[in-house]
Image (cartoon, grey):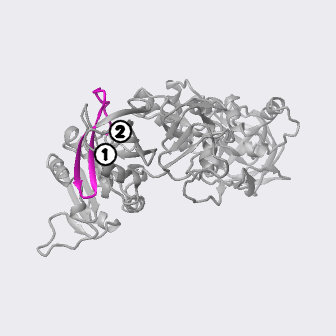
Amino acid sequence: MAATDHLRVSDNVGKLLSLNVGMPKDVAWKGRTVHTGIYKYPADGPRFVRRLNVDGDGQGDLGGHSGEQRAVMVYQQGSYEHWSEHLNRNDLVPGNFGENFTVAGLADDEVCIGDRYRIGDAEFEVTQPRVTCYRVGLRLGVPQMASLLVSHRRPGFYLRVLTEGTVQAGDPIVKVADGRHQLAVEAIDGLLYLPDRSHELLKLAVDIPALSPGWQQSFHELLAAADMGQTGPQAEAGREPGWNGFRPFTVTKTVQVTPSVLSLYLSDRSGAALPATKPGQYLTLRLPVGGTSAVRSYSISGRPDDATYRISVKREEHGIVSRYIHDTVADGSVIDVAAPRGEFVLDDTDEPVLLLSAGIGITPVLSMLASLASAHPDRQVWWLHVARAEADYGLASEVEQLLGQLPNAHSFLWFTRSAPPLEGPAPGTMFGRLDADGLRALGFDVASSAYVCGPTGFIEGMTEALKAIGIAPGRIHSELFSALASLNPGVVAMTTAAPHPPVGTAGTGPAVTFVRSGLTVNWSDRYGSLLDLAEACDVSTRWSCRTGVCHTCITGLLSGAVDYSPEPLERPEASQTLLCCAQPTAETVLDA
């Protein structure tokens, strides 16, 4: 049924004042180059509007600002007038906010998600508020603009093209249908980015078919988190750690699992009971190595009890911390330990599960296997492990004991650097490397949830192999202790240098440790934020708004304290920080 079959009104509700287009270009910004389509200018005469954009227009960030759900950006003349007064500027003209349509009317507190409009020969549907990012601020020379757009409740919105056609400045805007539940653009925007969100509005938001899939997913996650007592735009069950900072733990026992793997059993030095963990989480240790403090993270291996956590550490010949643990740590040693953390945790369902590991990557999935044996013994489990040789298969006897408690378990091993025995391999044992063909031959259910841990190359290869055999990307979970992949939208020609102290005079402020990058440096006030410091050190960073709105830069705060400037629209939990607007006020350890 065509959208025009749902005609509600035929009154004009606005007017297209200016039609703006512009192709992406490279611009200089903060010593870098950004590829952006934020620069739009009024076009003369009519233009044809297609499913993905207006003729003569283009988007620079195809991941965040393109596609059918974001074909046309709309901003209002009323908001231009607001910003001219607020910013004390008289130079704002149509296109300055990156919009394709500058309109009279259609205020953000009146237009609702799912509303449909006819402009010229084309018909449109409202899909979502503006994607909050730094590039409007770049265009206007106002770095805090991303935050202002949200806090002033004037984001603007995107349109989906229902019927392609020709439009031009001067066309009336006719409303032809109401969106479901009539939730205004500014209400939906605040529901994602502002605190004190309404649970009832979240339930209505996910019931709006026109709302774009990305926003739908965010609201579903917020609903699920709220149902489990969590809050905030990045809330997830179990995110808050059992204690803040580091506590002294005693090594109660050490066990040499293989020639290269040592297990440490750790108990709180005070004798206090330990908080429960989720299978797959890790501990972060602070150790006195080489006259300084070194911080590293290790997965909890096996199922902990209320008195003991266990980690298993592989000796790396070039790893100063792993060598220190193997050579120096003994029964009775005292180690500073941060509370269990991590989002690589086993789901609590009855669906088939695939546990796939290589080398010391066995540790978090072993914890998952132990949890399955005690809590879900009837669940269908596929245990796949890759090692160099049988002697390197750490914790093998424990694995076999747990598999014996799982009647629906299937176990397969691959040894990459040893030859099959003359009498033939044991059942389920292969020699060589695991690939997509090897996975496909096992015949497991592609509706399984997969948990992958091991070296970076192994994780990347297995992730692609699992996708190739039909497992949905959303069902593939992995644990990576190295720095996360950068997410710097629009920035081109990123450097790939190893993390290093910043160039120039060393800071004299609090020490800042980037755990995943293995780097500790001192803060200096010449940096505006921890994000600026990380970038100066070539630490991998993830951000979008740079003003405390989107929470893309949210990072675990293992210990320390920060202030915020600018103040984020919604502060994260105490165990996390927003790098883009945080400054350390004490020695700080970051999961970055």
Magenta stretch contains residue 70: no
- Say whether marks 2 and 1 touch (CB < 8 Å): yes
Quadrant of the image for the N terminus? top right
Lower position in the chain sequence, tag 2 or tag 1: 1
Q: Residue furthest bottom?
A: 422
Does residue 314 appear left or right of residue 65 in this picture?
A: left
Does residue 460 appear left or right of residue 566 in this picture?
A: left
- Give the image location of residue 588, x and y in percent: 52, 37
- Give the image location of residue 417, x and y in percent: 27, 70
The quarter holding residue 393 reads bottom left
**Front-most of residues 43 and 133:** 133
**Front-most of residues 423 and 132:** 423
Magenta stretch contains residue 256: yes
SS assignment at label 2 = strand
- Give the image location of residue 41, x and y in percent: 82, 50
What residue is drawn where x is 24% and y is 65%? Answer: 389
The residue to which callout 1 is attached is: 329
What residue is drawn where x is 61% and y is 59%? Answer: 495
Q: Can you say whether 253 is above or below 51 in the image?
A: above
Instruction: Residue type at mark 2: give it.
Output: Ile
- Give the image location of residue 230, x and y in percent: 44, 28
Q: Which residues are magenta?
A: 251-278
The residue to which callout 2 is attached is: 335
Using the rendered image of the protein, determine whether residue 563 is visible from the camera's viewpoint.
yes
**Front-most of residues 167 and 374:** 374
Tell me if mark 1 has few (under 14), some (14-19) or many (20+) residues whose alpha carbon lies within 10 angstroms of its own: some
Q: Can you say whether 507 is above or below 430 in the image?
A: above
Tell me if mark 2 has few (under 14), some (14-19) or many (20+) residues whose alpha carbon lies within 10 angstroms of its own: many
Q: Residue furthest front?
A: 291
Q: Can you say whether 317 is above or below 419 in the image?
A: above
Q: CA distance from mark 2 to mark 1?
A: 9 Å
Instruction: Residue type at mark 1: give it.
Output: Val
